[in-house]
């Protein structure tokens, strides 16, 4: 087998987690195009269920990027996954990045689930 390094960039989503570091839809598209020119394999464009603006940004990136895979973040919930799928419809190549909280305190207090149920 030949190993392949896949570059997965979270700038458009995780970059907004810093206070005061929000980006407009057009700024996200411009950055996504720059990442595509740098041949980034996967661009995580945002969290579509988080807000109408995030949905529109992911959709705009999915429509603009042609050579990289565009990814939307989603909790392990049907409505999140469906919303991400809607935002990514225009992508040549799309991926949904799902997650669920797994720390003991999150499972107990936030999800009210046992570890087996989370798994």
Image (cartoon, rainbow, N blue to C red):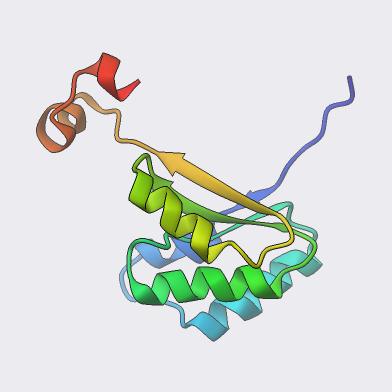
- Up-down relation of residue 80 to residue 102 (above or below): below
Q: Is residue 39 left or right of residue 1?
A: left
Q: Residue at x 34, y 43 (%)?
A: 77
Q: Nearer the viewer, residue 33 or 87?
A: 87
Q: Is residue 92 left or right of residue 18?
A: right
Q: How many marks?
A: 0
The answer to which quarter of the image holds residue 83 is bottom left
Q: Residue at x 71, y 69 (%)?
A: 65
- Does the image show residue 21? no
- Up-down relation of residue 2 to residue 25 (above or below): above
**Residue 22 x/y as whole percent:** 40, 76
Q: Nearer the viewer, residue 77 or 110?
A: 77
**Residue 17 x/y as whole percent:** 36, 62
Quadrant of the rendering where the C terminus is positioned: top left
Quadrant of the rendering where the N terminus is positioned: top right
Residue furthest to the right in view is 2
- Up-down relation of residue 29 to residue 114 (above or below): below
Residue furthest to the left in view is 109
Residue furthest to the top in view is 116
- Up-down relation of residue 36 to residue 75 (above or below): below
Q: Residue at x 18, y 25 (%)?
A: 113
Q: Residue at x 43, y 49 (%)?
A: 81
**Residue 82 x/y as whole percent:** 44, 53
**Residue 63 x/y as whole percent:** 66, 73
- Does the image show residue 87? yes
């Amino acid at each position: 087998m030949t190993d392949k390094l896949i570059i997965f960039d979270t700038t458009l989503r995780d970059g907004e987690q810093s206070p005061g570091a929000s980006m407009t839809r057009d700024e996200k598209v411009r950055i996504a195009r720059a990442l595509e020119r740098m041949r980034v394999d996967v661009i995580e464009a945002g969290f579509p269920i988080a807000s109408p603006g995030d949905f529109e940004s992911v959709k705009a990136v999915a429509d603009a990027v042609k050579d990289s895979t565009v990814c939307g973040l989603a909790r392990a919930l049907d409505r999140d996954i469906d919303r991400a799928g809607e935002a990514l419809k225009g992508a040549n190549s799309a991926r949904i990045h799902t997650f669920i909280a797994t720390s003991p305190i999150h499972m107990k207090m936030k999800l009210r689930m046992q570890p087996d149920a989370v798994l």
